[in-house]
Image: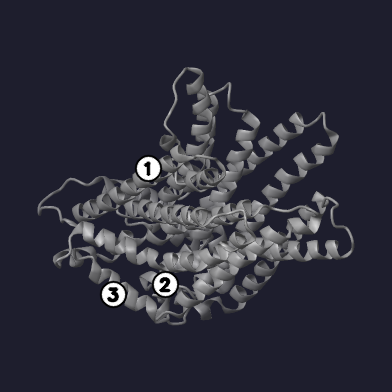
Amino acid sequence: MNFAPIIVRELRVRARQVRLRWGRVILAALALLIVTWLLLLPQWFGARMPASLALVTSFQLAFVVAFFMGARLTADAFSQEYRDNTLGLLLLSHLRGWEIAVGKLTSNTLTALYSLLAAVPMLSIPLLAGGATGMLVLRLALATLNGLIFSAAVGLFFSSLTPSGRKAWSLSLLTLLALLFGWRALSAIAVPVLLARGISLPEWVLLLSPTALTSTAMQIATTPGGGRLRTAFWTAMGIQQVVAWGLVLMAGFIATRRSVERPAGRVRWSLRERWQHWRLGSTAKRRERRQQELDVNPFAWLVNRYRFRSFWPLVLVLAPMAGGTALWIAFPSVVEPLPTAVGVVLVIHLVLKFHFAAEAVMPVLAERRAGTVELLLSTPLNNRQLMRGQLRAMTLQFGPALSLALLATLGVLGGLVRALSDEPELVSWSLALPLAAAVALLADCWTMTWVGMWCATWKNVPRKAAGNTTGFVLLLPWLLLIVASMGFGFLIATRGATGSPPNLWVWFGLWALVGFGNNLFWLVLTRRILTHRLRALLGRPVAPSDL
């Protein structure tokens, strides 16, 4: 096996990076904060969370992070080689395609694995309170590691199919969301229908989704004589690992085939060349569109010179809608339309926000990575014109998807009001929550437009720039909310209100204050920086650590 040199090289490079150590420290601190919040906050209101439940909940949160982090780390592994035309150089060596694939999977997930190992002891703190066993911790940790490897394999597979890292990430995201929500929903709906017809499925079939393993580990610990569940747990994990490594081997095979040059004299276009030509359009249409866009904003034309940039955002919105509709049509007696619609809207909001963060960094980052930013700075465009181009580019790309998402949210709003009209105390909630979600979607996207542009000026890797944008706008408010809720709960407890149920409107107001306050802070800060210093930031040389 010759993939070891790739892993050793990546280890030597990453060992010198300071962020490798700080990443483990930060993730361990976040895990400690979440576990403390899960254990202490219920006690301030006269309740108590069982240690086993706190343990499973904390590991489930870690699983969700690892499940999407793996694909994010590998979605650009082969795509980067395609864009730089360096995969052929690797294949000229003694390495084979599957060895390169295994090496890339291992090297790209090592950082996440180190962070996971640093977080496991913190997530296992509820074990000290009793009521849980070491085997439960082991199963939860292995389920989380299994989700990380499976997700990384999915991202590597789609990366071998396209030179676009963003397209590979979008396809990986759709696949992972289908596994995260679709498989569990389909199994929960189909099993009762099959049982009514006298058909029973083995337990391991229901656990083929990586998301089912964490909850099954809890069932094994609480079910007396759960031998069948233990067997199903290990069988499902083994099948998932076989599928994951099968995807890795397929990625190596596909990458090898793509790197083979076509015979000389071949005239026919490949499907990829036809797709690129269709995206650009004919010469006359390109000339007409170029003239129209240049009159409006040249930077916006540079970003949107390819047609149908709004295609993938629309796919990310329509795919959950199609999945929910298919479930309702297939199982009309089991699926409730309104709860399904609420779940679909939540998935749409989540997917759009993360995809928006990934795309908001690309207008500037594409020019920096291509080395053409000097040509952009040689134009008479000022900072405000560049910012208007960024806003126009994001509006044209995500406008149809956001409009469709808002229409779906308003449809859920009407359905909730109609369903809860007989309960006046719940009507206000049915109005407040969808409207707040719609406003939060627009506010987050508006903020990420400028935060992404700012992050692209000091990070030269799309994954890092998008990660910073996501952290500042989407993840930081939840961390602040956890800290604020802990402090708020402590104040309530010290004033003698222990045992009284918390007012949900207070928590809703706290969420709105933290979320929209965070948006306002980053919006004002980044717009001020970009207005006064954008061209200066673009003119800075790229640091070697950002490459």
- Which residue was labeled with disc 2? 368
Does 353 appear above or below 366?
Answer: above
Q: Which type of secondary structure does the marked residue at label 2 adopt? A: helix
- Which residue was labeled with disc 1? 235
Q: Look at 81% across and 41% down and name the residue there.
A: 428
Tell which residue pokes out farthest to the top in this image. 197
Q: Quadrant of residue 506?
A: bottom right
The C terminus: image quadrant: bottom left
Residues packed near mark 1 inside 10 Å, few (<14), some (14 to 19) or many (20 plus): some
Of 75 and 293, which appears nearest the observer? Answer: 75
The amino acid pointed to by label 2 is: Arg
Q: Position of residue 446 (x, y in %)?
A: 62, 59
Tell which residue pokes out farthest to the front in this image. 225
Mark toward the start of the polypeptide (1 vs 3) = 3
Q: Is residue 386 visible?
A: no
Of 286 and 441, which appears nearest the observer? Answer: 441
